[in-house]
Image (cartoon, grey):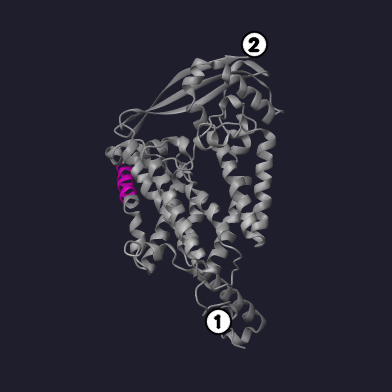
Amino acid sequence: MECPVTRPDRWLFTPVPLGRLAIFRSLTYPFVIVDVLLLHTSGWYHGYADPVWYEPLVIGEALGLPPATLALVQFLKWGTVIAALVALTGRWPRLAGAVVAVGWIWYQYIAFAYGKVDHDRGDFVVALLLLPTVGSAFWRDRRPSQAAGFVLRAVQLTAIATYFLSAWAKVRFGGWDWVNSATMVRAVVRRGTPWMRWLLDAPWLLQAAQWGLFVAEMSSPLIFFVPERVRRWLVYGWFAFHTLTYASITIAFWPHLVMLLAFLPLEEYADRLHGWFARRHAGRRVPTSVGR
Amino acid sequence: MATGEPVAARAIGQESSPVLLGRASRIWRTVLVLVLAVGFLGGTTVGDDHWWPFSPWRMYSTSTDPNTSVASTRIEVRTAADPGRWTPAPLTPENVGLNRAEIEGRLDQIRRDPAMLATLASSHQALRPREPAWVGIRVVIRRYHLADGALTGEFSDEDVAQWSAP
């Protein structure tokens, strides 16, 4: 693989199979639908909130975005869902993808312009903006493509920036003392699940976890310098971390979890899955020939 | 028939040469990445939540003193059905159109202008038309006390603001 430091131009445009991008799209656009309809619905409820609570963000002031109304949130919600369905079919990937990007980002804006900004959606914004820069891509297309490689690289970079810059934010807002503070105790008090409340009797464990998390986040950019095999395990490790977080305080950075998939050889997984189904299917038709 | 490698055999373009980008395409993409990098780095260094999507990734970034208290904001309401009694109500988007953090961020403003709380009653009415209307709302901060990072089991309540229907 190209080195990100000595040849950043080549590294940024390392070709990947178009099929990988196609599968990444097939995971991203359904997530958009699930997110809009089920996971992140506060934007829709802001259609019911009085405009007195509207606190425009910089981007909203620049673009003159109005406070939410019920009509606006309905339009954005269903417009985004329909566009995501079209994008999923693989038709008009650039147009449908662009409409999804605008609709979803505006819908998030409405969710965040009432005083509470979630911090798990930066990489998803980047992904939705960049996915339309690749034209048609199909699951079985193994042609290596620089355009596809660029999109996945940019998503990887933003996903890792999420970790690294959140460590930076801890230093900025919490100070270097953050690692020794009671931040995780506070989190468990406020939203701890019943089966994780025992952690409150072992505050030292939570403090150790804070040290571990901080070190992992600070060193997260190293993922771009390790061999491919190690890289995959690091990604699995982050998935394990997010699973534990969800079990403890029911916070999951859903869009970010989808973005982490940009690191993985999705087309190989799809091949393996397909091969497994094909063998199973063949085995059922001619049960004696398999020899099991 | 052999069932091995059914997929690879049907895959397109396994051997073909990469689909490359032209010079102009690479340049604007590189510029875009640099712009995004400046946005995210700037947001984390000097920005705040209003910079979204370039706002700092500050989830749980603040320090909590192990010997202080953890505050949790709640609302209590009086309903038209039982106007004499204060009962806790969920501070959720499904119930009032806003969530707890959004109310917590506006406590100073609510203190100055408790009439703002009336809008929560109207939102609740629109969202939950079958439930009894709210004729009074008060915002209470409950503080759970900590000692050496552990809960002491004690808490104290502070009334922030109160509104009653005229």
User: What's the amino acid at mark 1?
Assistant: Glu
Q: Are marks 2 and 1 in contact (CB under 8 Å)?
A: no
N-terminal label among 2 and 1: 1
The picture quadrant where one finds residue A198 is top left
Q: Are marks 2 and 1 on the same chain?
A: yes
Tell me which residue sits at (56%, 64%) in the image: A23
Element type at marker 2? loop
User: What's the amino acid at mark 2?
Assistant: Pro
**Residue A81 visible in the picture:** yes
Give A101 or B147, whichever is nearer the viewer.
A101
Quadrant where the C terminus of chain B lies?
top right
Chain identifier of the residue bearing label 2 in the image: B
Q: For the magenta stretch, what is the residue range?
A: A204-215
Secondary structure character of the magenta stretch overall:
helix
The percent coordinates of residue A260 (x first, y second) are 46, 57
The percent coordinates of residue A92 (x first, y second) are 66, 60
Tell me which residue sits at (53%, 78%) in the image: B14
Q: Going by the image, does A84 lie left or right of B23?
A: right
Give B86 or B139, whichever is nearer the viewer.
B139
Tell me which residue sits at (62%, 26%) in the image: A50
Q: Which residue is label 2 attached to?
A: B166
Q: Which residue is label 1 attached to?
A: B5
